[in-house]
């Protein structure tokens, strides 16, 4: 995904010159952002999870039910969509 970052970095006006050539920045979870406005390209399932004492998220039949994107319907379409959004 560093290629996506390099495309994005060239489009923002607050980056220093050639910043993307030597340093990366946080590119927030693009799948989470996508899920804020669409679910078309992912399969969403209810699953039960718990958080362990050491902070791991684990499947647990007695855990809290959450909706989770566990499988892609079309990963290549997501890549195409992401690149279009980053480089219109």
Image (cartoon, rainbow, N blue to C red):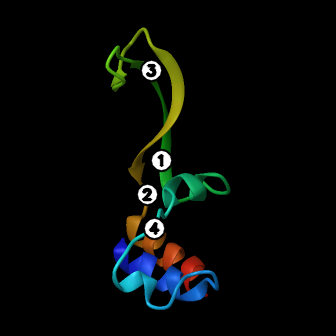
Measure how far apart labels 2 and 4 are at the Cα level.
29 Å
Q: Nearer the viewer, residue 1 or 48?
A: 1
Q: Earlier in the sequence, mark 2 or mark 3?
A: 3
Tell me where residue 84 appears, x and y as whole percent: 55, 82
Name the residue: 48% across, 37% down. 68
Decide if residue 18 is on the left or right side of residue 37.
Answer: left
Measure how far apart labels 1 and 3 are at the Cα level.
16 Å
Q: Nearer the viewer, residue 2 or 50?
A: 2
Measure how far apart labels 2 and 3 are at the Cα level.
22 Å
Disc ID at residue 73: 2
Tell me where residue 80 appears, x and y as whole percent: 47, 78
Q: Quadrant of the N terminus?
A: bottom left
Mark 2 vs mark 4: in front:
4
Mark 1 vs mark 4: in front:
4
What residue is disc 4 on? 25
Q: Earlier in the sequence, mark 2 or mark 1?
A: 1
Q: Report the residue that reaches farthest toward the right.
A: 37
Name the residue: 61% across, 83% down. 12
Question: At numbered mark 3, what does the secondary structure look like: helix, strand or loop?
Answer: strand
Q: Earlier in the sequence, mark 1 or mark 4?
A: 4
Question: At numbered mark 2, what does the secondary structure look like: helix, strand or loop?
Answer: loop
Q: Quadrant of the C terminus?
A: bottom right
Q: Residues at badges 2 and 1 in contact (C-beta under 8 Å)? A: yes
Q: Is residue 63 above or below residue 40?
A: above
Disc ID at residue 43: 1
What residue is disc 3 on? 48
Tell me where residue 64 appears, x and y as whole percent: 51, 16
Measure how far apart labels 3 and 4 are at the Cα level.
33 Å
Q: Is residue 47 above or below residue 18?
A: above
Q: Earlier in the sequence, mark 1 or mark 3?
A: 1
């Amino acid at each position: 995904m560093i290629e996506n970052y390099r495309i994005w970095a060239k489009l923002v006006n607050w980056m220093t010159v050639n910043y993307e050539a030597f340093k990366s920045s946080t590119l927030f979870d693009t799948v989470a952002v996508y899920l804020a406005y669409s679910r078309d390209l992912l399969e969403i399932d209810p699953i039960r999870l718990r958080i362990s004492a050491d902070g791991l998220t684990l499947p647990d039949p007695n855990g809290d039910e959450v909706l989770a994107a566990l499988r892609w319907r079309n990963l290549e379409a997501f890549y195409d969509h992401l690149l279009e959004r980053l480089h219109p």
